[in-house]
Amino acid sequence: MNIWVDADACPVVIKEIIFRAAQRACLHTTLVANANMATPPSPYLHTLRVASGFDVADDEIVERVNKGDIVITADIPLADEVISKGAWVLSPRGELLTKENIRQRLNIRDFMDTLRSSGVQSGGPAPLNNKDKMTFANGLDKLISQYQRGKK
């Protein structure tokens, strides 16, 4: 199992949680972004810089992800693609995206895009709060634990 992070828009506090979990579980974790990313020194933490452009980082993650990997992203179309390859998807707010709920999330995303293109201001998502951080950390730990139990 590897962890893939759609790192361009991933909040710093979430990256820090990911770094600690990857180190603790000895899981290779790659931050994919179109800019340089700093990580703590670790044999388990890697960065992959991709060219700038629409969906370049997403396409790279889709190309490299394997069944059973974890992908951290808030990008719903990316989540849909990697779920179809058998990966687990966790949003930075700790929501597990699955085959069962991804269609609904895509529909909501498309509806919000339609509203924004018609001039309606949606305001964007609220800032992460402590509950979101805890939900994310617990969700990531749960996925890692499920993987580790399956290895034994």
Image: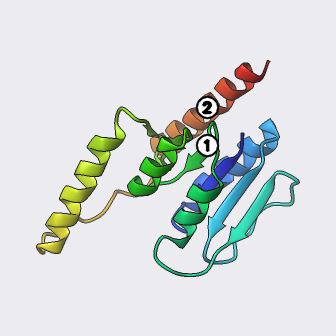
Mark 2 or mark 1: whose residue is earlier in sequence: 1
Q: Nearer the viewer, mark 2 or mark 1?
A: 1
Q: Residue at x 65, y 48 (%)?
A: 17
The residue to which callout 2 is attached is 143
Q: Looking at the figure, which quarter contains the N terminus?
A: top right
| Residue density around tag 2, few if under 14, some if 14–19, many if 20 or more, within 10 Å | some
Residue 143: quarter of image:
top right
Mark 2–mark 1 distance (CA, rounded to whole Å): 8 Å
| Residue density around tag 1, few if under 14, some if 14–19, many if 20 or more, within 10 Å | many
Q: Looking at the figure, which quarter contains the C terminus?
A: top right
- Tell me residue 42's x, y (percent): 86, 55
- Tell me residue 96's x, y (percent): 46, 37
Q: Which mark is residue 140?
A: none
Q: Is residue 51 left or right of residue 77?
A: right
The residue to which callout 1 is attached is 70
Q: Are marks 2 and 1 in contact (CB under 8 Å)?
A: yes
- Judge whether 15 appears above or below 120 on screen: above
Q: Residue at x 62, y 39 (%)?
A: 67
- Judge whether 146 appears above or below 42 on screen: above
SS of the residue under disc 2: helix
